[in-house]
Structure formats: C-alpha cells, structure tokens
Image: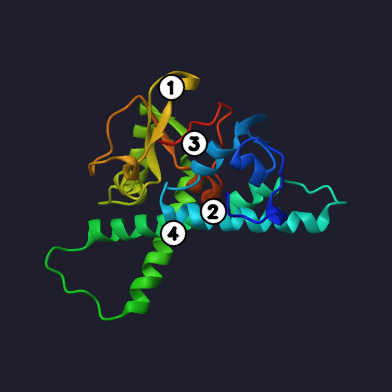
Amino acid sequence: IGRLPESVLMGRSASTPFARWLGTETVRIQSRSSDENAVSYLLRHTRLLPRDLIRLGNEVAFHLYRATWFEDIELPHSPIVDGVHALASLIGEELLKECALNLVGDTWPAGAVEPKDPAGIEAGIHSLRARLRDFLRQQAGTEILSRRRLETLRRAAEDAFPGSDVLGALWLSGLLGIVDGEGKKSAKAVFSFSLAAAATELPTKAKYIFHSSLIEAVGLRSSNQQAVPIT
C-alpha cells in the first residue's frame, strides 16, 4: 500500500495504510445492518493466501478507481463491497469445483481406469458443481450452523449425493469451517487452510460456519450477527 501512487488513494490524510487506500476504516454491511472493520471484511473473503490477497487488492482497486468516474452519482453499493463480491464469488466457484473433484474421487471405483474423454470429465464436474450450488442454496440456510443443524444438512446431503461425504469435501476445500471460541470478541472462524497440520476430517464443534466466498457464490443468507473474523 505504501508504494501506491497518491492518485489511487481514497483517504490520503488517514492515519493507517488501509484507510489511506480505501478511504475508510469500516465497511457498511447492509445485510447485517452494521459496520465491520475494513481489513477484517477483506480478509474473511479470502483463504489468506498471497494469491488471493493480490487478486482481491486488484479487484477492489479497480472498483474504487471506477467509482471516481461517477462522483456525482450515488452508487447503490460501496465500491469496496462490489470489488469484494466480484472476487469472492469467483473464489467460491473455484472452491466449489475443487469440492466437486473431491466428490468424484469419493465415488470413483477402486482400480478403475481413468476415462479417455477429458471433455466428458470436465462436463461431469461442471454438472456436479451446479448440483452442489443448488443443494447448498436450498438446504444450507444461513452462514452459521449449530451442530444439530449440521447433522440435518449431512443427512440431506447423503440423500442428494449417495456415497459421497459432502460436508467432508466442503471442509477439505475450505468452504466449511468451525467457530472457535465464544462471544463477539473471542469467536474466530477456522478453516482447513488455516491449520498448521492438515486435518482431513471435519472437527466436532458446537458451531460451524460457511466461508464468505461460498456465501457470495451461492447466495446464502448472512446471519444477523456480527461477522466472525477469519484466523
């Protein structure tokens, strides 16, 4: 941020680097009717990977710059929110494809020869991703799930995708995580990509959470609660 030219800084006199870039310390989240720290908002829509952060920075910078073309027009959404939505939706779709690949592996017969039709394989993965998207839109509800609600979702997934561990695939793909800690200040969202050691099975917790990229890609409802920061 310190290397950015002044022409792209929205808040040149702000006291923090992010505020100088974005022009604000907080972002208004209409679905929650509350303000959220801008840095926390940006990060929870990524996997905390350098690649994601660079892509997100470029997307938000583009939307901020484009907003300067319409300074006399009241835009329906914050350019920061528009930029985050654009990239998070793309990340969510990429991870849904990864999840679909994991599910294909679940049902692949042991010792079976790989088909020689790459186009057919890709079409099958695309179809499975679409089914996953529709299933989650209809069955998942809001972003935060109790353990009881998760088990209800698991049973529905077993009926919709026989022989596949949908929740396990969502966990491995980083789309489903756990809420660690209690209370607004101590609760953190933990995903498989956050852990130092790989955990192949979804841990048992009181609460679970869908990644923000999945919420954007599928159109899940955000909870009315304060957003849970990612760690």
Q: Which residue has dot 4 on it? A: 94
Q: Which residue has dot 1 on it? A: 186
Q: Look at the image and tell me whether residue 163 can be seen.
A: yes
Real-space Cα separation, disc 3 to disc 1, in angstroms: 18 Å
Q: Which residue has dot 3 on it? A: 143
Which quadrant would residue 104 be assigned to in this image?
A: bottom left
Q: Residue at horizontal 56%, vertical 47%?
A: 219
Q: Earlier in the sequence, mark 4 or mark 3?
A: 4
Say which mark, if any, is on residue 56: 2
- Mark 1, Cα crowd under 10 Å, few <14 / some 14-19 / many 20+, is few
Q: Mark 3 belongs to which amino acid?
A: Glu
**Callout 3 secondary element:** loop
Using the image as rendered, state which of residue 189 and residue 20 is in the foreground.
Answer: 20
Which quadrant would residue 106 be assigned to in this image?
A: bottom left
Q: Mark 1 belongs to which amino acid?
A: Ser
**Callout 2 secondary element:** helix
Residue 211 locus on image (x, y percent): 45, 42
Which quadrant would residue 37 be assigned to in this image?
A: top right
Q: Mark 4 belongs to which amino acid?
A: Glu
Q: Earlier in the sequence, mark 1 or mark 4?
A: 4
